[in-house]
């Protein structure tokens, strides 16, 4: 097993043992009391069953080949999949971007300093974005494109089952935040390469994280939601939320369902119904108070904006997008509005088949317009506590929706302060690309130790003048994955109690400031 300083690209082909590890002494220190959690040893059963050959965690659970024939089959299927990635017939949506990122990297490694994983590990070689990409490029040029003298021009890579398994796992040592692509002076997109490797493993080898596939895409298409809530269950839950929060807020409201011809079909992340019902209630209160024509849909998947295929598989992503578009078409709504879910924004905007052509937009410009319209009376003093804003990578960096959220903050939050850096330059929360719902095989430790570390550093910096339990502080994270990741980081380290942190979305802040609602919609742990 190699340390970061010893690690070389050729080590990806080592025939035995774990390639590397990240020691606790290699993790960046933080102003907050965030524990450095030792890795749990993988069991003998896990190591016999899966390819545990990269580091201390296992995301993909690639079956370990038992015979030379199985080893050869894994390599050959991988090569078949790579050929399809570079085929205009099989990968026309992403081919030009993939070819550009494969052919034109200048090896400057500007991407490394932009990566939150690289920073969190104090520059561990495995987390240099170009480490994974360069292995991919070498395999492509030597074994698929078969360039003359490729092994001498770019470096020789022995393509064995260990190489394939390690590259597959390396695609899941990335949150797909694309901060590296934004930093690259020529636009090379290492996150795209990671995502294409994930797609290859899913679509060609049938290997994917169970949380995203069986418990995500497949469950959603079977029952209507990755939460397993069918239409009747979700309607019953929302009816209970309406009743409960009408009493809590003193504001009577009712969430509309299946209204034909409504202006707006609102697509929530259905996880909010179960984990953060106050978010569902807040949207309904705001939309009713603003007099909007809107509805939810009880069609299959029409009430759940989640689209995990966005992280690993084009085919699954497109199937879910079609279900969303079909629900909108059936009701005859004018547009789809995406609630506080980052990846749902990108999937809905970028993947909808042209034959549907249902207009879709983010909730944030609409919420900004409502807040600024004068239709609702606000008392910003109700939000007179320190507030910072977490920028969802999919919403802000990928989609360019930056200003509406801040307009709301400046209007309703007297003590709003930015994280540094923020906007399109902000760092990933650490739960992006599906990790927020994974907690097995040391993944939860990885999220605490590595992927979420830089975001905790940003939060500490934003509240540097008021850390400690004396002052109540609100982390506004208008994205379900971000909230899930931040919740776990705060809970694992008792930071809500130690620092009087609360977290939630942007609609909660809006309702908290509404004059027609009882004070105290946002509550802290002790309340």
Image (cartoon, rainbow, N blue to C red):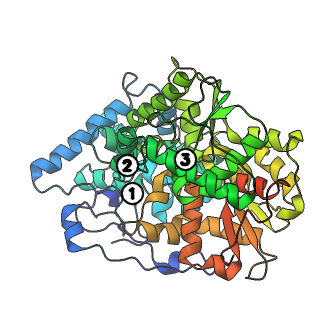
Say which quarter of the image contains residue 333: top right
Res 109 seen here: no
- Answer left or right for 341 relative to 20: right
Circles 2, 3 touching at the beta carbon (< 8 Å): no
Q: Residues within 10 Å of mark 2 (few under 14, many from 20)?
A: some
Q: Nearer the viewer, mark 2 or mark 1?
A: 1
Residue 442 in the image: x percent, y percent? Answer: 39, 69
Residue 457 in the image: x percent, y percent? Answer: 66, 70
Res 62 seen here: yes
User: Regarding mark 1 in the picture, which secondary structure is present there?
Assistant: helix
Say which quarter of the image contains residue 254: top right
At 50% from the left edge and 48% from the top edge, which residue is drawn? 236
Seen in the picture, residue 317 relative to 480 is either above or below; the reply is above
Q: Which residue is mark 1?
A: 9
User: Regarding mark 3 in the picture, which secondary structure is present there?
Assistant: loop
Residue 25 in the image: x percent, y percent? Answer: 51, 81
Seen in the picture, residue 453 relative to 30 is either above or below; the reply is above
Q: Residues within 10 Å of mark 1 (few under 14, many from 20)?
A: some
Q: Tell me the CA gap for discs 2 and 1.
A: 9 Å
Q: Tell me the CA gap for discs 1 and 3.
A: 40 Å
Q: Earlier in the sequence, mark 2 or mark 3?
A: 2
Q: Earlier in the sequence, mark 2 or mark 1?
A: 1
Circles 2, 1 touching at the beta carbon (< 8 Å): yes
Q: Which residue is mark 3?
A: 269
> Disc number at residue 155?
2
């Amino acid at each position: 097993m190699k340390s970061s300083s010893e690690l070389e690209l050729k080590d990806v082909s080592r025939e035995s043992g774990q390639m590397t590890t990240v020691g606790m002494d290699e993790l960046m220190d933080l102003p907050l009391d965030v524990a450095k959690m030792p890795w749990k040893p993988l069991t003998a059963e896990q190591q016999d069953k899966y390819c545990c050959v990269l580091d201390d965690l296992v995301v993909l659970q690639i079956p370990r080949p038992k015979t030379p024939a199985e080893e050869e089959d894994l390599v050959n299927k991988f090569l078949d999949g790579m050929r399809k990635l570079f085929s205009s017939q099989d990968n026309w949506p992403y081919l030009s971007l993939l070819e550009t990122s494969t052919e034109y990297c200048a090896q400057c490694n500007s991407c490394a300093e932009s990566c939150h994983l690289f920073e969190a590990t104090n520059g561990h070689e495995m987390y240099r974005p170009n480490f994974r990409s360069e292995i991919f490029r070498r395999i492509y040029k030597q074994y698929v494109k078969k360039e003359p003298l490729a092994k001498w021009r770019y470096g020789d890579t022995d393509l064995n089952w260990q190489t394939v398994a390690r590259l597959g796992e390396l695609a899941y040592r990335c949150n797909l935040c694309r901060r590296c692509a934004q930093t690259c002076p020529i636009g090379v997109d290492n996150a795209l390469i990671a995502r294409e490797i994930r797609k290859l493993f899913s679509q060609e080898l049938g290997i994917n994280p169970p949380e995203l596939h069986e418990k995500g895409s497949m469950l959603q298409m079977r029952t209507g939601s990755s939460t397993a809530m069918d239409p009747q269950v979700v309607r019953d839950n929302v009816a209970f939320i309406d009743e409960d929060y009408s009493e809590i807020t003193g504001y009577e409201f009712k969430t509309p369902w299946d209204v034909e011809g409504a202006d707006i079909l609102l697509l929530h992340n259905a996880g909010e119904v179960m984990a953060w019902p106050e978010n569902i209630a807040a949207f309904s209160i705001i939309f009713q108070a603003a007099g909007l024509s809107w509805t939810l849909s009880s069609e299959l998947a029409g009430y759940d904006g989640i689209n995990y295929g966005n992280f690993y598989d084009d085919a699954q992503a497109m199937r879910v997008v079609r279900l969303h578009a079909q629900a909108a078409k059936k009701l005859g709504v004018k547009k789809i509005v995406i609630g506080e879910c980052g990846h749902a924004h990108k999937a809905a905007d970028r993947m909808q088949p042209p034959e549907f052509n249902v207009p879709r937009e983010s909730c944030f410009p609409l919420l900004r317009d409502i807040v600024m319209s004068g239709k609702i009376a606000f008392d910003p003093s109700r939000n007179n506590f320190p507030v910072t804003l977490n920028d969802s990578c999919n919403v802000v960096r990928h989609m360019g929706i930056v200003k509406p959220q801040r307009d709301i903050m400046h209007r309703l939050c007297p003590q709003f302060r930015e994280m540094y850096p923020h906007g399109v330059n902000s760092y990933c929360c650490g739960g992006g690309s599906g990790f927020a719902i994974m907690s097995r095989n040391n993944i939860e430790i990885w999220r605490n130790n590595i992927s979420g570390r830089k975001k905790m550093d940003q939060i500490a910096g934003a509240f540097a003048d008021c850390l400690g339990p004396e002052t109540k502080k609100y982390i506004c994270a208008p994205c379900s994955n971000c909230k899930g990741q931040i919740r776990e980081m705060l809970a694992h380290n008792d930071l809500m109690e130690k620092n009087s942190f609360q977290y939630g979305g942007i609609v909660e802040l809006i309702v908290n400031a509404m004059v027609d609602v009882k004070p105290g919609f946002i509550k802290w742990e002790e309340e």
